[in-house]
């Protein structure tokens, strides 16, 4: 079991794939089709290089950034007027307390068995970053997936275009090494693009409902129990699609695709559908 913050085989694999796709796209696909000496080739190479650098930067941030640590001094304040709800245990109805970390759990926090600590607004533990995806690094993780999808699609288009343009002939056969590299890259990119696109779509779906992956699975059971009792379950943190997007991505729409996180607050309290002041922000 790997400790968070350490470089693991999955991380090395991801970095190797990024480097291999970059090399094949720029020096095989673009050079073999558009040529790096042309304006179109140079523009595509520059654009793909920028995408690659953004992917590396956001991936590195997702790996090294702490997902959100519960302060040792945290104690829920039951008398605080601006706290509309308190999460309780399903059994017994007591306030959520982590026996392993020996402190109360803030709303939406969960204990990670891999990281061996509680994580604020925990979504899941990701082996590909050897880290939890939580309150502090959720957006940078999402931005990485977004740009990774764009880069994969861009690379696939260039590789397919290069293959269609450079149909082998007797007079002009491309090198076996170049063809092999392009084929391997295309075979790698097809399932990778699909997997990343599905992952991106899944998290967009979650954001629109202001849920984490853990809360989604908890909500399935809560909905079933509510329907069984003749009630209607509503996720308490669902503020409406646009407000949900703002709470996760930030108030400035122009920065939604940027790995900024100045808007997220401490992660100890969150706005809920029961708040008396809809204009309040998480602190």
Image: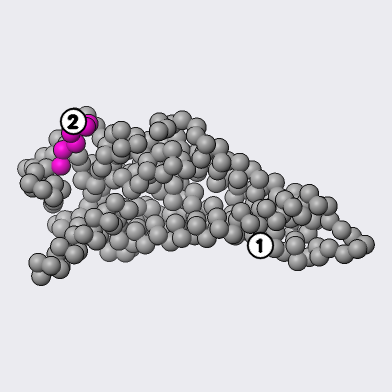
- Of marks 2 and 1, the one in the foreground: 2
In the picture, measured across the screen, residue 225 lies left or right of residue 6, that is left
Give the magenta-colored segment's residue range: 96-101
Residue 1 in picture, x, y percent from top left: 40, 33
Q: What element carries label 2?
A: loop
Q: As displayed, is residue 148 above or below residue 229?
A: above
Which corner quadrant of the image does residue 77 belong to?
Answer: top left
**Residue name at image x 67 percent, y 53 percent:** 184
Residue 79 visible in the current orientation: yes
Residue 53 in picture, x, y percent from top left: 59, 44
Q: What element carries label 1?
A: helix
CA neighbours of label 2 inside 10 A, class few (<14), some (14 to 19), many (20+): few
Residue reaching furthest to the front: 1
Q: Mark 2 points at which residue?
A: 102
- Residue 49 in magenta? no
Question: In which quadrant will I find the C terminus?
Answer: top left
Q: Which label is found at residue 157?
A: 1
Q: As displayed, is residue 93 above or below residue 99?
A: below
In this rendered view, identify the residue nearer to me: 131 or 45.
131
């Amino acid at each position: 079991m790997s400790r968070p913050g350490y470089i693991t085989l999955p991380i090395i694999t991801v970095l190797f794939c990024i480097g291999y796709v970059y090399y094949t796209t720029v020096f095989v696909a673009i050079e073999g089709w558009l040529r790096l000496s042309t304006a179109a080739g140079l523009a595509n190479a520059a654009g793909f290089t920028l995408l690659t650098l953004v992917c590396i930067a956001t991936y590195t941030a997702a790996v090294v950034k702490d997902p959100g640590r519960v302060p040792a001094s945290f104690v829920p304040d039951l008398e605080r007027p601006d706290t509309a709800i308190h999460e309780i245990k399903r059994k017994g109805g007591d306030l959520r307390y982590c026996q392993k970390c020996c402190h109360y759990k803030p709303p939406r926090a969960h204990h990670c068995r891999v990281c061996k600590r509680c994580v604020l607004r925990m979504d899941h533990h990701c082996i590909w970053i050897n880290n939890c995806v939580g309150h502090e690094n959720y957006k940078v993780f999402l931005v990485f997936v977004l740009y990774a999808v764009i880069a994969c699609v861009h690379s696939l288009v260039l590789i397919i275009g290069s293959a269609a343009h450079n149909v082998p002939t007797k007079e002009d056969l491309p090198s076996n090494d170049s063809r092999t590299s392009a084929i391997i890259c295309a075979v790698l990119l097809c399932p990778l693009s699909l997997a990343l696109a599905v992952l991106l779509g899944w998290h967009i779906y979650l954001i629109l409902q202001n849920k984490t992956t853990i809360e989604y699975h908890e909500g399935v059971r809560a909905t079933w129990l509510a329907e069984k009792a003749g009630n209607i379950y509503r996720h308490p943190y669902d503020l409406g699609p646009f407000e949900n997007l703002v709470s996760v991505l930030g108030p400035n729409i122009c920065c939604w695709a940027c790995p900024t996180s100045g808007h997220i607050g401490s992660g100890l309290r969150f706005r809920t559908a029961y708040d008396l002041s809809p204009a309040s922000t998480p602190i």
